[in-house]
Amino acid sequence: MAQAIDSLLRSYYDNFSEKYKQIADYIFQEAQFNQRLTIQEFAANCGVSTATISRFAKILGFDNFQAFKMALLAKEANTSPLFHEINANDTFTTMAEKIFSSNSNALKATWSLLTEEQLQKAVALINRAHLLSLFGLGASGIVAQDGYHKFLRTSIPTVFNQDYHLQLMQATKLTDQDCAIIISHSGQNKDALELARILKERQVPLIVITSFGNSSLAKLGDITLLSISEETNYRAEALHALIAQISLIDSLFMMVAVNNGQETEQSFKEIRAEIDRTRQ
């Protein structure tokens, strides 16, 4: 987290209060920070109180200002935008270059926010699950279905339904012995929040994948993994977030598969044998 303060702030920015946006804007504008920086100096530079700085740091997941300052000190000057706007004057090859570059930046920014502790906890929740259930609607449903397709290859029973009403039924059948993964770009979709509400009522361990760190859904997750999305006019379409979310699912799948080597290998062999049989 110490090396990804700008990426972290982008994932929280839209849901910040005006005071918090003021702090974030100041951080974006500053290329480097002084090692002797005090909380009083930083608060004065941002035009807010020291108490606001302390709350801001805790919202971002830092224990105190000192930990927050370490992230500020690790901030690297970067004059190029994280994501690139596409305009009508661009050639098609330029458009493609910007898309590839933005996808690559989204993956790097998303990876920079991952921690070993987060991933270990997420894998542990999946490994101990009697049933792994994936949830997602719209574009997020594509990510959930991709996860379902992958986790079917493991020894962990896995379910996913595209229909929302079936997802509601699916959620009501889970217990605290299972595990759920909900994917939502905004983290504010009312249907996704309803699914999360049901899961929390039933005390189902919940892994959330979203692009907004302080969204309503992010706050409900036992583990929340952030997918950094594009900062362009097409943000609402979550074009780059989709790539990052699929990569997070890929990572969880591979970690679980490697962690359960023998069981996974046996499952792979059985599935491959049946698929090969259809190709003869």
Image: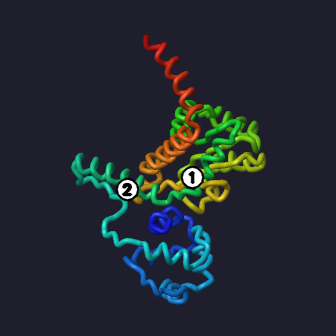
Relative placement, left or right, of 166 versus 23 is: right
Q: Is residue 188 visible?
A: yes
Q: How many marks?
A: 2
Q: Looking at this view, is 86 or 48 the one in front? A: 48
Q: Quadrant of residue 74?
A: bottom left
Q: Is residue 257 above or below residue 17?
A: above
Which residue is found at the position 71% from the left and 36% from the top? 130
Dot label at residue 119 = 1
Classify mark 1: helix, strand or loop: helix
- Name the residue tied to disc 2: 105
Left or right, 232 with respect to 157, comes to left
Q: Position of residue 73 (x, y in %)?
A: 44, 76
* 210 versus 160 height, above or below: below
Q: Is residue 26 left or right of residue 43?
A: left
User: Label 1 sits on what residue type?
Assistant: Leu
Circle 2: element type? helix
Nearest the camera: 225 or 233?
Answer: 225
Q: Position of residue 2 (x, y in %)?
A: 48, 68
